[in-house]
Amino acid sequence: MISKTGLNALKALATLASLGNNEYMGANVVAEKIDAPRNYLGKILGTLTREGIVISQKGSGGGVRLATKPEKITLFDALEPIEHLSEWTTCFFRDGSCHDKGSCSVHSKWGPVRDQYFKFLKTTTIADLTDDFQN
């Protein structure tokens, strides 16, 4: 349910979570650590920077780092700019959103699955992923 781009974003953020305060890691180093193409990861990090999840600093000693503590970045926050998860509230078969009063034929099945998935993404943080990405 998460694209390869989304997974690489999460891997990059989990890798950056290992940095100390005000430390930066070069995007090339992050790409190497998570085995992702440099240019591709650079675009992902650019998106995360524009969304305020990552801070970028140019020059010697620069690179990228998390904008806040990994405990404060939910998977939903990290994936929304890439996966556009909020659009999942639209109906499978109709324009607009599906709701309990006037729903489509799969609403009763999809709604609870979607809600559980969103709950997982909103209660799991980058800090929960860091054990798999520590050096």
Image: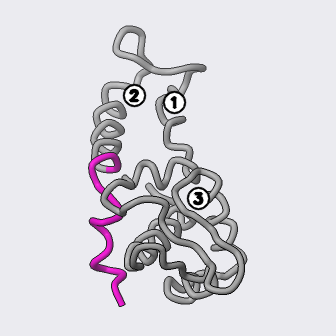
Check the picture and name the quadrant holding the C terminus.
bottom left
Whether tag 2 and tag 3 are in contact, CB under 8 A, the answer is no
What type is the residue that disc 2 sits on?
Val
Residue 8 position, x and y percent, is 52, 70
Q: Left of 11 or right of it: where is 42? A: right
Which residue occupies 47% across, 73% down? 22
108, 53: nearer the viewer: 53
Q: Is residue 53 above or below residue 27?
A: above
Occupied quadrant, residue 11: bottom left
Name the main secondary structure of what is drawn in magenta.
Answer: helix
Q: Left of 71 or right of it: where is 32? A: right
Whether tag 3 and tag 1 are in contact, CB under 8 A, the answer is no
Neighbor class of circle 1 (other Cα within 10 Å; few <14, some 14-19, many 20+) is some
Helix, strand or loop status at disc 3: helix
Residue 71 position, x and y percent, is 30, 59
Residue, disc 3: 48
First along the sequence among labels 3 and 1: 3
Whether tag 2 and tag 1 are in contact, CB under 8 A, the answer is yes
In the image, residue 129 lies in the stretch drawn in magenta: yes
Residue 109 position, x and y percent, is 32, 32
Q: Magenta region: which residues?
A: 121-135
Helix, strand or loop status at disc 2: loop
What type is the residue that disc 1 sits on?
Phe
Which residue occupies 71% across, 81% down? 59
Q: Nearer the viewer, mark 2 or mark 3?
A: 3
Residue, disc 1: 92
Residue, disc 2: 106
